Amino acid sequence: MARGSVVTAKENARIPCRFLNQVGMTPQGFVELAKKDRRKVEDLLLDFVSELHREGNAPNYIDNYLKAIRSWLNYNEVRLVRRIKIGNRNLTPTIANERVPTGDELRAILSIPKARAHCSISFMAFAGLRPETLGNMNGSDGLRIGDLPEMKIQNGQVVFTKIPTMVVVRPNLSKAKRRYFTFLTHEGCEYLKAYLEMRLARGEGSAVIAVHPGYERTIYRRGRSESDFVTTKNITREIREAMRPRFNWRPYVLRAYFDTQLLLAENHGKISHAYRQFFMGHKGDIEARYTYE
C-alpha cells in the first residue's frame, strides 16, 4: 500500500491498533478469531460501528475503520461477508460550516511577517497546489526551483520571464500520480520573489519551500539525506498559525479559494471546465468538494 500512498499506508496501520486497543484484543488473537468464527468478528465490528455512531463520529471516520480492518483481514486471508451499513457516508460535520475566504480575509492571513508561510499560502491560494506538493510527508521531496521553468535566478535576483508563471507538478508530487501544470498569479510571484531572494541561490534542484539554513543537518532530519524540503506537517502548521486565532479554517480552504476563482473565470467564459479540472490536478469532476457556490 505504501507504494501508492505512504500517508494512507501509515494510517491504515494505526487504525487496527486503535481498534484492537478499544476491544481489548491482540493482533494475533483477532486474526485467529476471524479465521475460526467470521460471524463473531462481524458482530464485533457491527457493535463497534454502532458505538462510534453513538459518540457522534463522522461517517467518513467510521468508514476508515471498516476499510482498514477489512484490508488487514484480507491480507490475512479472511474475507468478511456481511455488509455493515454506515449512513450518510459523504457527510462531513466537522467542516459543515467551513467557507471559502474572501479576498480581504486572505489578505489578513497574508499579513503575517513570516516569508516562508507567505509562499506556502500563495502556492495553495493562487496556484491551487496541495501542501503535499510543496513538501511531502517525510521531507524527502517537494516543489523544486526547477519546477518553475519561467523563473530564473540571476545574480541573486529572481526574474520571471512570464507572469502568471507556470508551475509544473511532477507525478510523484501529484495525488493523481500524473504530471500537470498550473500557474502562479502576479501576487503569488511577488511573495515567492521576496522569499527566494532572502535565501542563497542553491540551484534548480533545491526546494522552493525550504527548511531554515543548517536545520537539514540536525538530529530532527536524521535519515532524510540532509534534504532541505519542509514536511507537509510543518507546512500546514505554519498556515494554521497564520490563520489563528481569527480564522478556524483548515489549510485546504486555500485550494477552495483557488477553485472558486477558476469557477468564476469559467462562468465568464475565460477558461473551459476541462482546464479548471486540469489546473486543480484532478482526474475526474470533483470540484464540488472544494467549491462553495
Image (cartoon, helix red, strand yellow):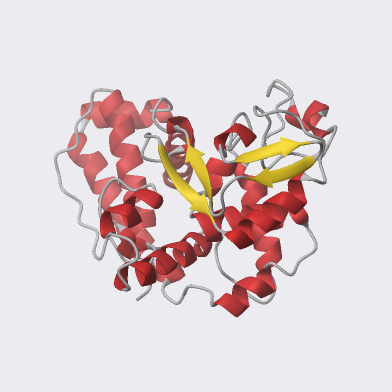
Q: Position of residue 110 (x, y in %)?
A: 69, 67
In this rendering, is residue 45 above or below 171? below
Q: Which residue is found at the position 50% from the left and 49% from the top?
A: 130
Camera sees residue 52: yes
Taking the view exactly as shown, the residue that stands out farthest to the right is: 214
In this rendering, is residue 166 above or below 187? above
In this rendering, is residue 131 above or below 154? below
Q: Which residue is found at the position 48% from the left and 36% from the top?
A: 173
Q: Give the left or right position of residue 89, taking residue 143 as reference.
A: left
Taking the view exactly as shown, the residue that stands out farthest to the front is: 161
In this rendering, is residue 221 above or below 166? above
Q: Give the left or right position of residue 168, taking residue 239 as reference.
A: left
Camera sees residue 237: no
Of residues 275 and 69, the one nearer the viewer is: 275
Q: How many marks?
A: 0
Q: Which residue is found at the position 65% from the left and 58% from the top?
A: 239
Q: Position of residue 219 (x, y in %)?
A: 81, 28
Q: Can you tell which quarter of the image residue 121 is in? A: bottom right
Q: Can you tell which quarter of the image residue 222 is in? A: top right
| The N terminus lies in quadrant | top left
Q: Position of residue 95 (x, y in %)?
A: 45, 69
Of residues 140 and 193, the one nearer the viewer is: 193
Q: Give the left or right position of residue 195, taking residue 274 as reference.
A: right
Q: Position of residue 182 (x, y in %)?
A: 45, 48
| The C terminus lies in quadrant | bottom left
Of residues 26 and 201, the one nearer the viewer is: 201
